[in-house]
Amino acid sequence: MHHLTACAAQWKMELIKIFAVMCFSVVCVAMTDEDYVTSMWMDFVPSSALPTEDQTIYEVTSMFSDTFPTSEVSTETQTVYEPPVPSLHLQSPWWDVFPFEKAEFRCSINDSSDWTFTWYRNEQRLPDADINVSSNPPHQETLTIAEASRAHSGIYSCKAHHKVKGDSINSNQVELKVYANKPKPTLMLNPELQKMFPGESVTFQCVIMSSGWDYLWYHDDKEIQGSLKNSSTIVSLALSDSGRYHCKAKRGQSPFYTEQSETSTLQVSEPPMPTMKLQSSWLDVFQMESMELICNVGSPSWTFTWHRDGTALQEDPALVLSLGGALLNITSASRAHQGRYACKAHLESRKVSSAFSSTTSVTVYGNIPKPSLSKVPVLNSLYVGEITTFTCKVHLGSDWVYHWFKDGKELAVTDETLGIRLGPNDEGTYWCKATRGQRTSTDISDSMTQYVLEIPVPSLTRSSQWADVFPTESVTFSCAMAHSSGWTYTWRRDNQVIHRDDTVSFGPDGATLSIGSASTSHQGQYSCSGKLKGRSVSSNFTSGMTLKVYDNKPFIKLVQDPEHMVMHTGDSVSYSCHINQSSGWEYVWYKDGARLAASGKNYSIRSVVKTNIGSYMCQATRGTMTGVFNTEQSQALKLQVEDRPTANIIVLTGWSEVFSTDSLVLKCEVKSSKDMWKWNYTWYKEGHWIVNSSSDKYTVTPQNDPVQSQYICQGIRNGRPSYSKHSDPLATRNLLLKRRVLLSISGCILFGIVAVFFGCIVLRVTRKKEVHDEGPEEGELFLTMAQLKDRDDAPCPMVDYITDAELTVPAKEGADIICSEATPIPVTSSDDQAVTTENSERPPAEESPMVSFQH
């Protein structure tokens, strides 16, 4: 309760006019919440009537009750003259404003114009320094607060000034309250449920303890277009209506916005899906057995209905529902109860129904089946230590108790599976049967026989041919299980497990161990063991296999035989490559750094030639293409080859002796001999050695060679070279004939020249004087060789070699061409190079006896 004392206030009533000063008390009832107090001065506006001489003064006592104010008026007449009272009004729509809102006051006098106004807050004149407060010129009858703040709160009044009438009294007072902060609305939901279902309705309310607001609604921070009312209703919820909701309000022409309300989350989801469970032991039953199904959504306020194969269950004495329909009991099953069962939940208070639960199939059988027996692994033969699992399965019904038998004796196992870690005594024949309850029992299953084997030991072999290797050489070991597959292998060296690294690698399944570059660290005893893939079977390790690794590469040496620095063409030479360690080597040969197409420990040249000159080396290698080990190259041995001296046959018999003797003297000489060793000579006639012919000279006579054969000679000695090349062959018959033919031709030419000379003299002497009469042409004085060939009377200078028996044979047809100018005369020796022919073709042997003696 506030007590306010106001002076010069008046009621705006038609019958009362107050000009005297009057004091009264006002009792104002305000709200207890300070933030929402509004001024109550709005309706008490004084009139602007001018004073008169006779007035009545009234004393007014105002009393405010809880509902409506009442007044008691006493009157007293007194003549007083009083200045006018300005009337102050709040132009803006509301009395309580918030930071940055606009407020506007208006002060007016109904007396006349030309009044100016002064403004007061809390009886203090307003300063001119506040930029947010302004009054319109020139009279300042309007006061505007552009952006209100807490400092603008207070009781406002105004006073009028007239240049003739003077000042008025103070106007009525109007209180303006400015809150410290923007208002924050409160968002309420009806109904206030944490979870709503599709089809239900919900109402949102935005509450602010002041007036004049328009409301804005937001869903997931996006404005909802539509009503500006303080409430919003969603009549039928959908899943998309889930989300966060909040509101805020605005008012004024240049809207002033409140803070946004707290966010409320609306969760719209489908009704819970019922869960159906089996309460009894099995879903598939035999006739006359019982079973129970229960439906649950996790809340006690739901009720349930049941359906079989999509149709609601009908009344049945064998079907009993309890717990609000949540429990379904089939007391005595029959074929009619077989089908797919489902339940549905209902929330009657909100008219909400769930979807159907997942279906459960109930099967009702007649005959009891026979169990099936299976085994994992399916192998009939397993190794000692392996685990085998037998499974006995009845494919109809559930909750069976199983009984196991081995070789006719029952085992103390009642599970569906029988697991055995095999030992030698576990070999035998197995079968099973099943029971359920007190009266239900199956027949026995088919039987299965299990054999138990001892684990074999793998065999270890070395793929490479040698057990001693050199640094960087490769070695491969192999581990294999005879007559079996599917094994993986583990390797050990000196009882330490070997792992893969930069130098050791394993083949598929570890069946091979390869050392790509051996070192002394790889030396030791190697062994392996096998393990079956996917099975717990491991063999013992094999006995060890020793690998020796040398510290250094082997030494290789090249040996030449014979060990001469210089060889002569035709000599034979052999190289052999020697290595000091291990075996299994193959050899590579090089000449001047280029590899030769030769292999083997030895490399031989049967007959050296100049192209064999060079530097020879060898190298040893062993291994495969994937792991080849090469030794260092041997030292180089240089082979020098010189031409073997050549023997040459010289004819010592001169030209002048051709017609005086039948023999020829031949001499053998060796050219380019640079040392002092004496040469002996060997003579060959027609390729056969002539016995006792070691002299450098040999005489051919009609007695020792009546057919005039072909001769070759060769030089031999004790030094190097020990023999020369064979001379070129020399045919003595062709030589004698050629010489005689050449001598005959020379005689013919000389005789012809002399005859022509003397003929010319004779003709010169005997020639007649010139006769001018034309006569027959004279024949040519000299005949050509072609013309002589065509004449029968032409003399032939050729003579027969009377000592040659073969020349006594009658000449063949055309033999007279030996005198022809075109007949070629073969020249085979260096002494006969002066004689040439115009035709280079040799006549066939059967056409002419003139055959070259050179071959």
Image: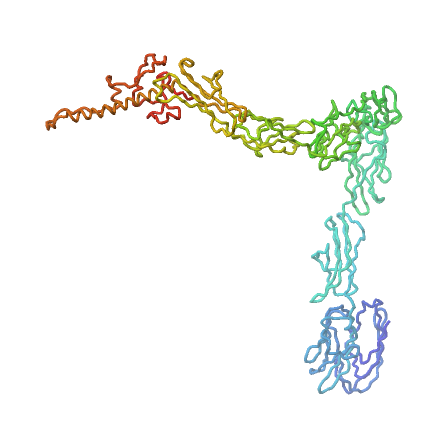
Q: How many marks?
A: 0
- Residue 382 position within the rendered picture, expressed as x and y whole percent measured from the top left: 79, 24
Q: Quadrant of residue 595?
A: top right
Q: Is residue 12 visible?
A: no
| Quadrant of the rendered image containing residue 793 | top left
Residue at 78% x, 22% y: name it. Answer: 381
> In this figure, which colouring scheme has been used for the structure?
rainbow
Q: Determine the residue positioned at 36% across, 14% down.
A: 804
Quadrant assignment for the N terminus: bottom right
Which sits in the foreground, 568 or 503? Answer: 568
Left or right of 566? Residue 700 is left
Please determine whether, in this image, residue 4 is positioned above or below residue 485: below
Q: Quadrant of residue 157?
A: bottom right
The answer to whether residue 583 shows anywhere in this view is yes
Q: Residue at x 79, y 60 (%)?
A: 186
The image shows residue 712 at horizontal and vertical percentages of 45, 20
Above-or-below relation of 199 to 412: below
Where does the image place residue 540, in percent across and percent down from the top left?
Answer: 80, 27
Quadrant location of the C terminus? top left
Q: Is residue 757 left or right of residue 549?
A: left
Q: Is residue 282 left or right of residue 229?
A: right
Give whichever of 811, 533 is nearer the camera. Answer: 811
Q: Where's residue 689, x and y in %?
A: 48, 17
User: In the rendered view, does 783 fall on the left or right side of 125?
Assistant: left
